[in-house]
Image (spheres, rainbow, N blue to C red):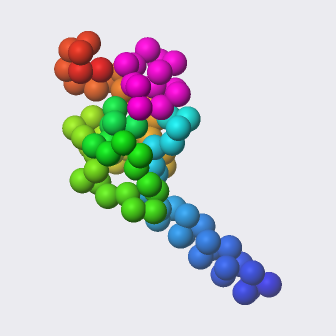
Amino acid sequence: MNFLLAIAVLGMALVSAVPALATPQLLTEAKKAGMPAKNCQYCHTIAMPKKESFKTDQLNDRGKWMMDEKGKKNSKDIKAEWLMDYPGGKEQK
């Protein structure tokens, strides 16, 4: 029983250590919120970011801001609604 508990705790620790990444669903939510997001490059500098090789230097200013917000809000996931608070004028949204 203790072995199963140890495996479960280890599994949860590993999952929580993985950074939250953008998903196609996040892009869809941004569009539904009225953001002019057309593709992944709304927040990333590369066209098709891969979860396995993700690096924060592959984020543009908006993506870096979203990661900062994730930290400030102590959130497990990035939320599309945060884009409404992205600084700058309408053209920056």
Residue 21, image x and y in percent?
45, 49
Image quadrant where one finds the C terminus = top left
State yes or no: residue 53 in magenta: no
State yes or no: residue 29 in magenta: yes
Which residue is at 40% across, 37% downward?
Answer: 40
Which residue is at 51% across, 62% downward?
Answer: 16
Q: Is residue 47 left or right of residue 52?
A: left
Which residue is at 37% across, 19% downward?
Answer: 36
Image quadrant where one finds the N terminus = bottom right
Task: Provide the residue span drawn in magenta.
Answer: 27-39
Q: Is residue 7 left or right of residue 77?
A: right
Residue 37 in which image quadrant: top left
Q: Is residue 13 above or below residue 6?
A: above
Q: Is residue 30 above or below residue 13?
A: above
Residue 68 in which image quadrant: top left
Q: Residue furthest right?
A: 1
Which residue is at 52% across, 26% downward?
Answer: 29
